[in-house]
Image: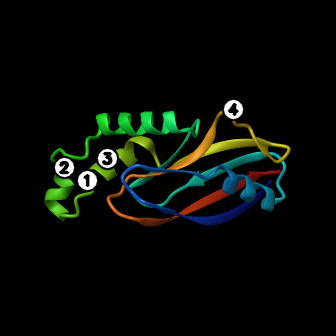
């Protein structure tokens, strides 16, 4: 078994900004020289998450609206009362989505569906530069 790690950065606008990162994950797998295994994609921090969607404008807007219904921005959050930074909603949204996914790959290609892409969702209330870690494990 072999393990290879890589990291890349993505600039975001916050407020549920969704960025496709599939090509960057593919690149990390290719650089690993590992043919078959699992790629773990992880974003550090408590106000962003990683998931998969069909990366097209309709689904992007549907996801943003669903997130707003689940954890509305403009309600009381105890975090805001304690810290005063106004991003309590971002912490709750990120907790619901989660910071990572695991994607199997075979012959160097991720086993994603035809319309499935990996995305970073930044929920924070400001511009950010996010680091994304990709841990490739396999043979």
124 with respect to 19 (left or right): left
Crowd band around label 4 with a 10 angstrom C-alpha radius: few (<14), some (14–19), many (20+)? few
Dot 4 or dot 2: first in sequence order is 2
The residue that disc 1 covers is: 88
Q: CA distance from mark 4 to mark 2?
A: 37 Å
The residue that disc 2 covers is: 77
Seen as rendered, the residue at the extreme front is 57
Residue beneath the point at 55% across and 55% down? 42
Q: CA distance from mark 3 to mark 1?
A: 7 Å
The local secondary structure at tag 3 comes to helix
Crowd band around label 3 with a 10 angstrom C-alpha radius: few (<14), some (14–19), many (20+)? many
Label pair 2/3, CB-CB below 8 angstroms = yes
The residue that disc 3 covers is: 92
The local secondary structure at tag 1 comes to helix
The local secondary structure at tag 2 comes to loop
Dot 4 or dot 3: first in sequence order is 3
The front one of 123 and 62 is: 62
The residue that disc 4 covers is: 113
């Amino acid at each position: 078994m072999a393990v290879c790690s890589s990291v890349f950065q993505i600039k975001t606008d916050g407020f549920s900004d969704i960025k496709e990162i599939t090509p960057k994950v593919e690149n990390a797998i290719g650089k690993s020289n590992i043919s078959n295994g699992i790629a773990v994609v992880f974003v550090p921090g408590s106000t962003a998450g990683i998931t998969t969607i069909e990366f097209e404008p309709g689904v992007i807007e549907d996801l943003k609206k669903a997130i707003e219904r689940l954890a509305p921005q403009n309600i009381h959050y105890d975090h805001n009362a304690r810290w005063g930074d106004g991003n309590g909603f971002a912490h709750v949204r990120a907790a619901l989505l989660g910071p990572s996914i695991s994607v199997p790959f075979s012959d160097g290609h991720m086993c994603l569906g035809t319309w499935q892409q990996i995305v970073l969702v930044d929920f924070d209330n400001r511009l950010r530069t996010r680091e994304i870690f990709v841990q490739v494990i396999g043979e």
